[in-house]
Image: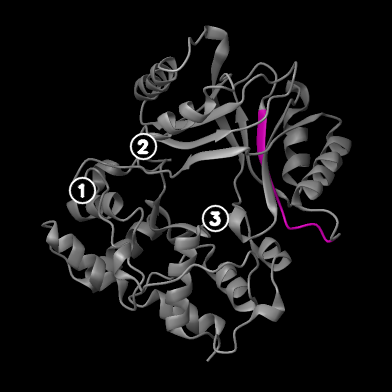
Amino acid sequence: MKRVDAELSTLDRAIINGFQGGFPVVSHPFDAAAAALSDRGIEVTGPELCARVRTLDSDGVLSRFGALVNAEEIGGAASLVAMHAPEDRYDEITEIVNDFPEVAHNYEREHPHLNMWFVVSVADHPDPDKDGRDRIAEVLSRIETATGQETYDLPKRREFHVGATFLVDGPIPDGDLDCSHLGPSVTPSDRDTLTPAERDLVVEIQGGLPITETPYADVAETIDADPEWVIETISRFNEEGKVRRIGVIPNHYALGYTENGMTVWDVPEEVLPDVGPAVADLGFVTHCYQRPRHEGVWEYNFFAMTHGRTEAESERRIQEVKRTMEDFWEVDPDDWDTLFSTRILKKTGIRLDERAESNTDSSSEPSSTRE
């Protein structure tokens, strides 16, 4: 993919740095966002800002614009899975695995044994005595039967950080332009389930918001809901964690962040609660989790994903993770590894339709939602 960061204007750079989170949830969000940029010395009107975001999206600089939905909080379950695919069958096994609709992302990674890594995403189990984890086990059993290869399930045990931010040189270099306070005051719900209207909203926004001057009203029209309800619900979802952030989501490959290193660590259990937050505080770490070991095959229990624009930058960042680790225990060479991705095998994204549907309670629908 062509690296486009050198072609970005000052306004483009301000948009990318300033709005990867905290985009306003108000009736005319681009006007409010433009005012926030003007306060930082970037003069632009709301319509101009909207048009520029639309162009960045169509040019592939952005993956999308909108709400990053937290699938875990919507329903169902997901897990990271590792597998060994023999070299002489690699393409065959890739095709088999990718044919499973439950498989979202799939990557070839550098490792002497576990060289295929994919994400399985499922709805809640239809059996009320079972859950999403049972359904993942069923999918993995089918994959093993179809491929003849063992799978290694690596579900998230603890999340320390999820928040991929890719900054470029230019205005707002720290990415600290947060307009989330401009939205309505909301009270989080104590419900674990979704109402039918909330389900429809999740399904509608999962792929992004329309890039118009009134995106929330346009969503409301599509799902036949009240615009103020859409604004309040998206704001509440943000408070509840159902939405991780709202804003522009850059295509990090287009910005030159092509070096993708999954660092894995065998962290002593007693220091893990301290190590996790410390590594999560490193600004270039985009994902940071505790996951299970598999005795005799996979000895690592801590994952930290880093991205860099060159091999040298990526290596510097990995070494910084290592130095942070060394503040807590004596790290031996055998205690860690870096698995670089060498090929994207599948990247369809996690579709939430079935997961949201399986977690919807029709009896909880407020009467005023569609008015």
Q: Which residue is mark 3?
A: 70
Earlier residue among tags 1 and 3: 3
What's drawn in magenta, residue-wise?
116-126
Residue 334 location (% of width, % of height): 57, 9
Quadrant of res 75:
bottom right
Label 2 sits on what residue type?
Gly
What is the x, y in percent for residue 141? 85, 40
Badge 2 local density, few (<14 within 10 Å), some, or many (20+)?
Answer: many
Residue mark closest to the camera, 3 vs 2: 3
Q: Main secondary structure of the magenta part?
A: strand
| Residue 256, numbered circle | 2
Q: Residue furthest right?
A: 145
Front tag of 1 and 3: 3
Alpha-carbon span between mark 2 and mark 1: 19 Å
Dot 1 falls on a residue whose secondary structure is loop
**Location of residue 107 in the rendering, given as x and y in whole percent from the top left corner:** 61, 35
Asked if residue 323 is positioned above or below residue 43 in the image, the reply reads above
Which of the labelled discs sits on residue 172, or is there none?
1
Q: Under tag 3, what secondary structure? A: loop
- Look at the image and say whether residue 122 sits in the magenta stretch: yes
Q: Nearer the viewer, mark 2 or mark 1?
A: 1
Q: CA distance from mark 3 to mark 2?
A: 26 Å
> Earlier along the polypeptide chain: callout 3 or callout 2?
3
- On whether residue 255 falls in the magenta region, the answer is no
CB atoms of marks 1 and 3 within 8 Å: no
The structure residue drawn at horizontal position 49% and vertical position 65%, both measured from the top left corner, is: 237
Assign a secondary structure to mark 2: loop
